[in-house]
Amino acid sequence: MDTKKSWNDIPSLEGLQMDWEYKSERAQDRRTFVRIGKESLAKLLEEKDVFVRIVADGQTHTARLLDLSEGGLALDAPVSLEGSRSVKLGFILGQVQVVSKVEVRHVRKWKDRYITGAKFIDLDKESADFIRGLYASKVLRHAL
């Protein structure tokens, strides 16, 4: 008959070293926050597109949300926001209005549009919690 093993029966790992340190090559594995893509947002919010109002350098523009995390977002914008000193944006997710300053991190021209990645600067706790909850809802929908 087998006897149960205890934690004391497991040998010590002292002195054991790895000759390499694993680092993922995938961008999503290096991100601090998990992103929710446009398609997942459309299903969760039952809206085809989420429009974002941008105020930059005294002008107002409308962009489409491409992906979202509690750390930032990606936009399909009609103008380049690169070099903008102060950028503020607002959009509605279901019943929650999100308004925040952002720091533009990168801009890539695509056809006549600009794919823009931005980091939230002063996202309020309610909005951050709601965005985090959207990701949890996405995961739960896949599990059901």
Image (spheres, helix red, strand yellow):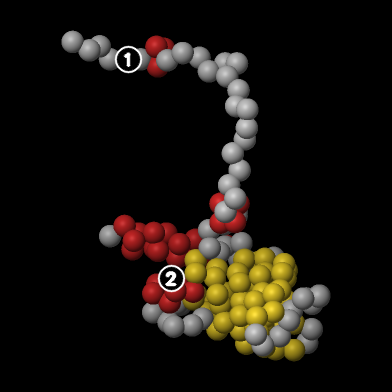
Give SS at disc 1: loop
Residue 34 locus on image (x, y percent)? 53, 58
How far apart are the alpha carbons under marks 1 and 2? 45 Å
Q: Examine the image and state in which quarter residue 28 appears.
A: bottom right
Quadrant for residue 80, please give it.
Answer: bottom right
Say whether marks 1 and 2 touch (CB < 8 Å).
no
Q: Which residue occupies the foreground of this view, 89 or 111? A: 111
- Disc 2 residue type (three-letter): Ser
Query: In the rendered view, would you say 26 is above or below 1?
Result: below
- Side (left or right) of 133 relative to 106: left
Spot occupied by residue 74 in the image (x, y as percentages of width and height): 61, 72
Question: Dot 1, crowdedness within 10 Å: few (<14), some or many (≥20)?
Answer: few
Q: Circle 1 sits on which residue?
A: 5
Asked if one can make out residue 24 in the rendered structure from this viewpoint, the answer is yes
Circle on res. 77: none
Q: Position of residue 79 (x, y in %)?
A: 71, 85
Image spot of residue 13 (x, y percent): 53, 18
Exactly how many numbered labels are in the figure? 2
Q: Is residue 122 visible?
A: no
Q: Residue at 56% of width from left, 77% of height from top? A: 65
Q: Secondary structure at mark 2?
A: helix
In terms of image quadrants, where is residue 57? bottom right
In this view, 58 is above or below 143: below
Residue at image coords 18%, 10%: 1
User: Residue drawn at (62%, 87%), measured in percent from left and top?
Assistant: 62
Q: Quadrant of the C terminus?
A: bottom left
Q: Which mark sits nearer the N-terminus, 1 or 2?
A: 1
Residue drawn 67% across the image and 74% down it = 116
Amino acid at dot 1 = Lys
Q: Which residue is mark 2?
A: 40
Up-down relation of residue 14 to residue 29 (above or below):
above
